Amino acid sequence: MSGATSPGPLAGVRVVELAGIGPGPFAAMLLADLGADVVRVDRPSPSPLGVEPAYDLTNRNKRSVLIDLKAPEGPGRVLDLVERAQLLIEGYRPGVAERLGVGPEACLARNPALVYGRMTGWGQHGPLADRAGHDIGYAAVAGVLGMIGAPDAPPAIPANLLGDYAGGSLYLVVGLLAALHHARTTGAGQVVDAAIVDGAAHLTSMLWGLLAAGHWQDRRGVNLLDGGAPCYAVYRAADGGHLAVGALEPQFYAEFARLLELGPDAPAQYDTARWPELRARIAERFATRTRAEWEAVFAGSDACVEPVLTMGQAAAHEHLAARGTYVEAGGITQPAPAPRFSATPGALRRPPARPGEHTAEVARDWGVPALDSEAR
């Protein structure tokens, strides 16, 4: 993971990440993938997740220093780094960073142009702000979890992707970069309050419009984009594999119906009263062949049918392989940096940082000699 020809579009941006779990580290990884110099401030105690550091891919492209924030000199060491940084990421509960001496007031006093990013589930204020939580709960309260799954089954759980990473990390990164632009223009830093509930709710903007227009029902499994429509659903093949159908537009659905051999007597695509009958007809057809056989049938067509793949199968898919969407580095298959840049592409420059392994290096590069003397 070295010898990259491009430093990335965020080269020269220094980021202090106060170690945490979940969306904060992922947001910092995204910045690091794009060339930012991310220094993760790890605590002396091991990670609560118990993951071997070499496999924690959210720490790739970063450097790590060990600082005990509860030690008398700990907050000062962090503030020394903050003074030389443009961005900071922390994911503590509201008030914790302040009690540790590294809250926004202390940091902005040392560096008025700093963008201070706060990553939480519930946000910095509100009745639930101090309550513990995880992705599943944030997505549930934001109205997102209840949208996913069959109408006659409990809501499906999309790992921690929609809350932690989509509603959390990505919104934090957008906020950090927007505030960085403002800071570079005005010299004034600020605090970015990125709450997963806010971001997850924001993701549903289009659906709120459809709801107001009468084109969306506030329940799952009965709408155009949630599996309610037979032309936008997942079906089981003869071998137990699944295929995803997204034939929404009439011309694509016509191609789909032709290749699936639905027959001229099949219910019309948008005859909602006969959707149960159409769904059963489509399911019956898919059940006659294996997933691979159906892949061959739909190959090269605009029927909008794709196989539902596992992680391992996705990494080997011909299209993703051709694009280099997944790469192997350090013996670990992993997603390549995204998005892509024509002039300043991101790169995998460093393997996941082990806690404290870059203390001397960062002390030298950032000009904080006391950091290295403390580690010794």
Image (cartoon, rainbow, N blue to C red):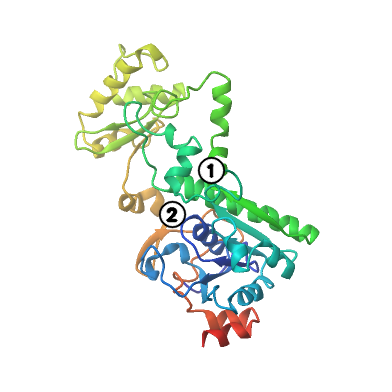
Q: Residues within 10 Å of mark 1 (few under 14, many from 20)?
A: many
- Between 57 and 349, the residue placed more toward the observer is 57
Image check: 335 left or right of 201? Answer: left
Image check: 171 left or right of 295? Answer: right
Q: Is residue 87 visible?
A: yes
Image check: 43 left or right of 12? Answer: left
Residue 1 location, x and y as percent?
Answer: 46, 71
Give the CA distance from mark 1 to mark 2: 29 Å
Dot in front, 1 or 2: 1
Say which quarter of the image contains residue 235: top left
Say which quarter of the image contains residue 300: top left
Task: Please name the residue that numbered disc 1 is placed on.
Answer: 197
The amino acid type found where label 2 is placed reads Thr
Task: Looking at the image, tell me whether mark 1 or mark 2 is earlier in sequence order.
Answer: 1
Task: Please name the residue that numbered disc 2 is placed on.
Answer: 325
Q: State whether residue 210 is above or below residue 134.
A: above
Q: State whether residue 128 is above or below residue 312.
A: above
Q: State whether residue 130 is above or below residue 252.
A: below
- Between 119 and 125, the residue placed more toward the observer is 125
The amino acid type found where label 1 is placed reads Val
Taking the spot 52% from the left edge, 69% from the top edge, the residue there is 62
Say which quarter of the image contains residue 225: top left
